[in-house]
């Protein structure tokens, strides 16, 4: 099977790259083994909240410029501030074109409210998510009886520390009784499958109506809107009060919506989506990947002109930690990693050196195998090394920026506009 490009991994990075390439007329396949990190994410995307030395980033340009000294192997430092900002802006447009209504802009990060009632800097958040609440506003935080993945009392306590008047409530929705019988099924996504049904809109409104009259705004767990924000829009209109949604513990309704809409756009563009398959290994000759071998297609290899490795980090087994060290799972690419004795810090909440491990690249994002740079292989997303997505708040941004950079270079080599 011949393709212009084969992408290994269909998470945020793989899909943004695939959508861009198919949008330029390329024949692209994405092979993706399982669920991506999006299903477990907040649904908000981070760009760069903190520098590696812990300093908060308030001016993105200045922050990006400092990475060259502080972390020269950081993917943003390899690409340089101008390109990072340009790609981030391009990603905003692309997400909007895919039907994702997000608030936030590259130039102006916002503070989104977390499920524990704290504030966290973000680049883009779903439009339903509350940002920067004003002190003095009266918020009703409404949980769902029996739903353990969102605790309104905890959120209210956190908000009160921010001087926001917050009161916790729970509503009972009889349509969910069938899920309540099995606590492991009582998750945000299964609840959404019930509440997204038109028939449940009136009971939901009824449960919220009196609370909506007593508060400036109601915040609910994100338990509806798997496909779109129709229920949310209707609720705001019907109750005539602002209703906003907080992310819950995974699985994430916002993250799964993003995954679905990106997948749909890729397929609409003519991309070939190969879910549930995995690339087991690759044939390499003369510094190029000539074939990819997958579990399902056995002896029929995929033959691409270009390959993008977007297989994710430890979470998706793109990186594997073993006794001998950390390795990249598909092509055994060279990995930058801390010395064995310096992988972890005892303080669980400290920046962990193993988070920085990942595939080594240069500013072209090509990977090295056994000392040789592979000329048609680009690496994008969280399989890359040189950054810490958690303490630096840059996970989503790294994926978007590197995915678009990989796509642009492939287009340039194919002379596509
Ligand atoms: C649990 C979690 C929550 C996060 N939350 C946030 C957040 O809220 N905001 C934020 O900005 N960042 C967040 N991040 C950072 C996150 O890494 C990125 O935002 C991003 O979603 C990662 O995308 P990715 O495409 O690099 O990898 P992934 O999303 O991990 O996708 C990789 C895909 O590749 C597939 N794959 C792996 N190996 C193979 C193979 N051999 N063959 C075929 N397919 C393969 C996997 O099955 C998976 O589907 C989070 C990360 C994790 C782990």
Image: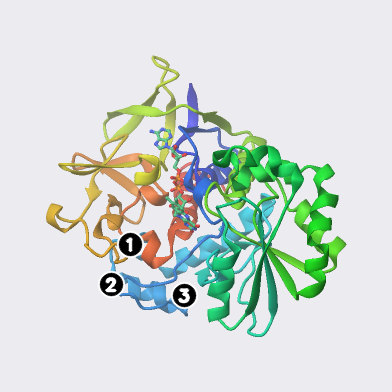
The CA distance from mark 1 to mark 3 is 15 Å
**Left or right: where 327 falls relative to 194:** left
10 Å neighbourhood of mark 2: few (<14), some, or many (≥20)? some
Judged from the image, the secondary structure of the residue bearing numbered disc 3 is: helix
| Residue closest to the eye, 403 or 288 | 403
Image mark for residue 60:
3
Q: Are marks 2 and 1 in contact (CB under 8 Å)?
A: yes
10 Å neighbourhood of mark 3: few (<14), some, or many (≥20)? some
Judge whether residue 226 can be spotted in this image.
yes
Please tell me which residue is depicted at 64% across the width and 55% down the height of the picture.
Answer: 222
Judged from the image, the secondary structure of the residue bearing numbered disc 1 is: loop
Judged from the image, the secondary structure of the residue bearing numbered disc 2 is: helix
| Residue closest to the eye, 248 or 15 | 248
The CA distance from mark 3 to mark 2 is 15 Å
Give coordinates of residue 352: x percent, y percent.
27, 61
Image mark for residue 341:
none
Q: Earlier in the sequence, mark 1 or mark 3?
A: 3
The CA distance from mark 2 to mark 1 is 9 Å
**Left or right: where 341 falls relative to 133:** left
Q: Are marks 1 and 3 in contact (CB under 8 Å)?
A: no
Give coordinates of residue 154: x percent, y percent.
54, 67
**Which residue position is annotated with label 2?**
70
Image mark for residue 74:
1
**Left or right: where 291 falls relative to 149:** left
Give coordinates of residue 331: x percent, y percent.
29, 35
């Amino acid at each position: 099977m011949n393709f212009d490009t084969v992408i290994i991994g269909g998470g945020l990075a793989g899909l943004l790259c695939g959508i861009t390439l198919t949008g330029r007329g390329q024949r692209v396949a994405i092979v993706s083994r399982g669920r991506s990190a999006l299903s477990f994410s907040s649904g908000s995307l981070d760009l760069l909240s903190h520098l590696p030395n812990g300093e908060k980033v308030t001016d993105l340009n200045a922050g990006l410029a400092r990475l060259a000294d502080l972390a020269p192997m950081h993917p943003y430092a390899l690409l340089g501030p101008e390109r990072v900002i340009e790609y981030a802006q391009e990603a905003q447009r692309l997400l909007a074109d895919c039907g994702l209504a997000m608030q936030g802009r590259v130039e102006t990060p916002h503070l989104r409210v977390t499920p524990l009632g704290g504030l966290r800097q973000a680049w883009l958040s779903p439009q339903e998510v509350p940002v920067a609440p004003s002190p003095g506003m009266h918020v009703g935080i409404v949980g769902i009886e029996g739903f353990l993945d969102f605790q309104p009392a905890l959120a209210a306590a956190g908000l009160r520390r921010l001087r926001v008047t917050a009161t916790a409530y729970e509503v009972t929705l009889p349509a969910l009784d069938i899920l309540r019988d099995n606590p492991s099924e009582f998750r945000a996504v299964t609840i959404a499958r019930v509440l997204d049904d038109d028939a449940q809109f009136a009971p939901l409104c009824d449960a919220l109506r009196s609370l909506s009259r007593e508060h400036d705004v109601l915040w609910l767990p994100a338990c509806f809107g798997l496909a779109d924000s129709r229920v949310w829009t209707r609720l705001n209109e019907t109750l005539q009060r602002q209703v906003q949604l907080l992310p819950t513990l995974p699985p994430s309704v916002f993250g799964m919506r993003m995954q679905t809409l990106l997948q749909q756009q890729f397929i609409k563009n003519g991309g070939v989506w190969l879910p549930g398959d995995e690339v087991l290994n690759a044939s390499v000759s003369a510094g190029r990947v000539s074939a990819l071998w997958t579990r399902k297609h056995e002896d029929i290899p995929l033959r691409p002109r270009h390959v993008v490795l977007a297989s994710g980090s430890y979470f998706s087994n793109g990186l594997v930690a073993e006794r001998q060290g950390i390795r990249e799972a598909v092509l055994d690419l060279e990995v930058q990693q801390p010395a064995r004795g310096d992988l972890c810090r005892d303080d669980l909440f400290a920046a962990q050196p193993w988070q920085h491990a990942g595939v080594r690249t240069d500013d072209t994002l090509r990977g090295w195998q056994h000392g040789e740079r592979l000329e048609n292989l680009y690496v994008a997303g969280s399989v890359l090394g040189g950054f810490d997505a958690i303490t630096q708040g840059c996970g989503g941004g790294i994926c978007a920026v590197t995915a678009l950079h990989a796509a642009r270079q492939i287009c340039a080599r194919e002379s596509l506009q």
